Image: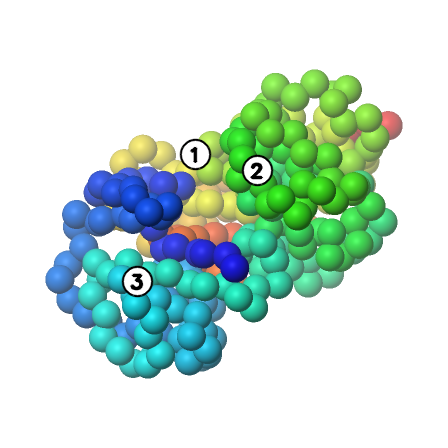
Amino acid sequence: MIFLQAASPADEPTGRFFRGAGISVFMDVHARRHKQRLDQLLVDQGFAESRERAARMILAGEVRVDGVLVDKPAKAVSAQAVIEVLAQGARFVSRGGEKLAAALDAGFIDPAGLVCLDVGCSTGGFTDCLLQRGARRIYAVDVGYGQFDWRLRRDSRVVLMERTNIRYLDKSAIPEPVELTVIDVSFISLTKVLPPVLQFSTPGAIVIALVKPQFEVGKGEVGRGGIVRDEAQRRDVLRGIVNFAAGLGMTARTTLECPLKGKRGNQELFAIFECGSTSHGVS
């Protein structure tokens, strides 16, 4: 059983964290004392892509509010309530798998039989998705330690590199050309991550990068709660990433909105690139 929580230290803090009994709870000091339908709150906080999906989750007994199971989608819930989703029917070890599945469904690449690189692997949602789609080998890299799912750790197709920063990873650490790279990083701009990724990529390789506007806009440009609400800002961020990648010899194949928002409600985007023959990839 996987617990997905709306509160996450992976977003810019605007309040205080309280830890206990194995969970982290974020209390937003700016939260107003108003109530909202539970199904809409699940959508706003990124747990579901629509109210219909949220209602199904609630009716299935997969949602707890302040530790109590709630089975009424229309129940009025305080904005300060602690929401937990019990992802019993989840396809992947984390929501990241659902996000990547949507990007792969765009049809630009099939991971089956490919050597892949997962940058910012965290719990392993992206890796899980790639494995289920038939990836031959996955090099999973993360600066953290101990988050990666234990089932995935035991998979012979996975080479896990914890406590490893992709920016300083030696080229010899990945001894075969990477044909598909997926990226999901926080607290760092993609402009710092894309250049080192290229040294492992074969010409023609595909890079699928999750763009998180809150980590790309300048200081002071992030709104209350760590959320970038301005659509024009998000477009500017995406344009900047695409232009930066072009300078590295990467061609943008497509961009699309991620169907699931970040845990605090940020609208994330995907940028899918193809590495050109003039990039820094291996020959």
Identify which residue, 123 or 246, lies in the foreground: 123
Label 1 packing within 10 angstroms: few (<14), some (14-19), many (20+): few
Numbered disc in front, either 1 or 2: 2
Could one spot residue 198 in this view of the protein?
yes
Q: Amino acid at mark 1?
A: Phe
Q: Amino acid at mark 3?
A: Gly
Q: What is the secondary structure assignment of the residue under circle 2?
A: loop
Q: Quadrant of the C terminus?
A: top right
Q: How is the image coloured?
A: rainbow
Query: Where 63 falls versus 143 (above or below)?
Result: below
* x and y, in percent, of residue 5 in the image: 39, 55
Of the numbered discs in the image, which one, if any, rests on residue 67? 3
C-beta proximity under 8 Å, tags 2 and 3: no
- In the rendered structure, the answer to whether residue 79 lies left or right of residue 67 reads left
* x and y, in percent, of residue 102 in the image: 62, 61
- In the rendered structure, the answer to whether residue 136 lies left or right of residue 146 reads right
Quote the CA–CA distance across marks 1 and 3: 30 Å
Residue at 77% from the left image edge and 20% from the top image edge: 172
Q: What is the secondary structure assignment of the residue under circle 3?
A: loop
Quote the CA–CA distance across marks 2 and 3: 30 Å
User: Outermost residue, left direction?
Assistant: 33
Residue at 22% from the left image edge and 41% from the top image edge: 16
Numbered disc in front, either 2 or 3: 3
Residue at 27% from the left image edge and 62% from the top image edge: 66
Label 3 packing within 10 angstroms: few (<14), some (14-19), many (20+): few
- In the rendered structure, the answer to whether residue 212 lies left or right of residue 160 reads left
Q: Amino acid at mark 2?
A: Gly
Instruction: State which quadrant residue 149 falls in.
Output: top right
Of the numbered discs in the image, which one, if any, rests on residue 150? none
Residue at image mark 2: 120
Identify which residue, 205 or 159, lies in the foreground: 159
Of the numbered discs in the image, which one, if any, rests on residue 187? 1
